[in-house]
Image: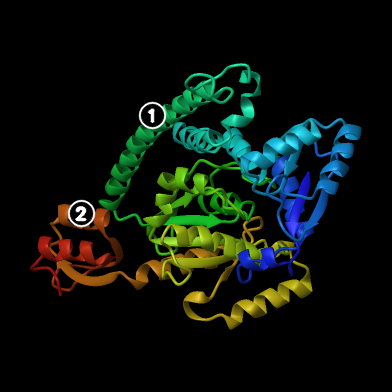
Amino acid sequence: MLGPYLRRHSAAASAIRRPGADREPQARLDEAIGLALAIDLNVVSAGIVSLNDIRPATFIGKGKVEEIAGLVKSEEAGLVVVDGALSPVQQRNLEKAWNAKVLDRTGLILEIFGRRAHTREGVLQVEHAHLTYQKSRLVRSWTHLERQRGGFGFLGGPGETQIEADRRQIQERIARIEAELESVKSRRKLHRDSRKRVPYPIVALVGYTNAGKSTLFNRMTHASVLQADMLFATLDPTLRAVKLPHGAKVILSDTVGFISDLPTMLVAAFRATLEEVIEADVILHVRDVSHEDTEAQMHDVGDVLLSLGIEQTDPRLIEVWNKIDALHPEARESVFNKAERLEGALSPTLVSALTGEGVESLTTAIEQRLSAKRIELDLILDPADGAGASWLYRNTEVLEKSLQPDGGLAMKVRAEPSKIEQVRAKFPAAVH
C-alpha cells in the first residue's frame, strides 16, 4: 500500500486544496488500508511518499519507483495499491517497473463496489462505472497483440484494430446498461410518485462511509441491515417506515456512503439511487464526531451533495453528530459545548446509534423540520362521514380529534400545502 501525497506547502498542493478539507497523511493512508481490508486484501507493507509535484510518467520520483520495486520483490507482492488517481500511462509504467499489478484509488473503490452491490440496479451501476474506467485503459491489457498490425498498409500501430474492436464492444455494453438504468430510473420515479400520493415524507440518511448510517437506520427502524466497522459495508439503498413521536409516519432511506475523492463516474452511475436524496423531505447528514478527520469528511460529503444540487444551507439538512459514545469525557464535553453554540437550522443533533442515546431527540427534530413547512387546518365533519375521516387519515397527519357538544366531529390535520388544497376542495363546508 503506497500513499503518495503532496506536501501541504507545495505549489501543486496549494493549487488543488479546498478550505477545511486538509487531512493528515497518516489518516489518509489508514483510510486507504481500510479500503483494501474491505475486500480482504492482505496488506503486508504500507508507507507514505511525500511529493513536491506529480511526475507525468510515474506519479512518483524515479528513486522511489526503484526503492518500491525492491520492496515488492522482497515481499513477493502481486499487487500494489496506490492511494491516488493514476493515469493509464502512469499505471502501465509502474506495473512494468514493479512487475506487479497496480491498482489506484478509483480502481480500488470500484472493486469494493463490485463486491458490495447485490441488487440488479446496484450491479448495473457498478458495471457501468467499471466499464467507463476501463475504456480509457484498454491499451494496458493488450500487449499480447503487438504482433498484429492495424490500420492501412504497414503504418498501422500494433494491436490498434483489436483495441478499437474491444473499445467498441465496451461502448455498446455501456449503452445497453444505460438503457436498463433508464428503465430503473423510470420505475423509481413511479415509486416516488406513488409515495407522494400517500402522506409519508422521505427522510434520507447521507454521510461519509463508516459514519454509522446503517447502525442508525437499524436503531430507528428495528431493521437488520448489515452494519460493520468497515468502509462501504452497505451499498444498496434500503427503505423502511418509521413512526414519529406524534404518530406520523416517514420513510427512512439508507443510501450509499461517500468518501474523499469519490470517482465522478460512480457519482454519475449512482445518480438514480441518489435521487432518493434529491427528492427527500429531510436529509440527515450523519457524521462520525469521534473521527479525527470529521471536519474534512463533512466537506467531502458537502461536495457530493453540492454536485446533486443540495447546498449546505438547504433547509432540509439536519446534521447528526454520531458516535458520541466513543468520545472521551473531555472530548465529549467539548463537542456538546460546540453544538450548543450552533443555533437555528445549523444546530446539530447528537446521538449514539450504538447505544440509542439522543435518537429520541433526533426523531423529534425530524418531526419539527417536517412540520415547519406544513399547514394546519381545523375541520368539523359529520360524525356519520366515516369515509371522509378515513380519507383524512390516509392523506394527512391527524393531530387531534374530538366530538363537539353539537355532535360534530372536530379534527385538526396537518399536511403539505398541495394536500391542504385538496382538503379544502374535498371538504369546503367543513373547514373552519
Q: Which residue is mark 2?
A: 391
For the C terminus, the quadrant is bottom left
**What is the distance, in whole Å, between disc 1 and disc 2 at their CAs?**
44 Å
Residue 279 lies left or right of residue 124; in this view the side is: left
Residue 375 lies left or right of residue 215; in this view the side is: left
| Badge 1 element | helix
Which residue is located at x 46 percent, y 33 percent? 124
Which residue is located at x 85 percent, y 42 percent? 66
Bin the neighbour count of mark 1 within 10 Å (Cα to Cα): few under 14, some 14-19, many 20 and up: some
Q: Which residue is mark 1?
A: 176
For the N terminus, the quadrant is top right
The percent coordinates of residue 139 (x first, y second) are 59, 30
Outermost residue toward the right in this view: 74
Disc 1 or disc 2, which is closer to the eye?
A: 1
> Along the line of sight, which residue is nearer the eye, 380 or 10?
10
Which residue is located at x 16 percent, y 52 percent? 387
Amino acid type, residue under disc 1 in the picture: Arg
Where residue 399 sits, quadrant-wise, is bottom left
Bin the neighbour count of mark 2 within 10 Å (Cα to Cα): few under 14, some 14-19, many 20 and up: few
Which residue is located at x 41 percent, y 27 percent? 172
The percent coordinates of residue 22 (x first, y second) are 68, 66
Residue 75: mark:
none
Q: Is residue 351 visible?
A: no
| Badge 2 element | helix
> Along the line of sight, which residue is nearer the eye, 292 or 68?
68
The percent coordinates of residue 86 (x first, y second) are 65, 45
Amino acid type, residue under disc 2 in the picture: Trp
Where residue 234 sits, quadrant-wise, is top right
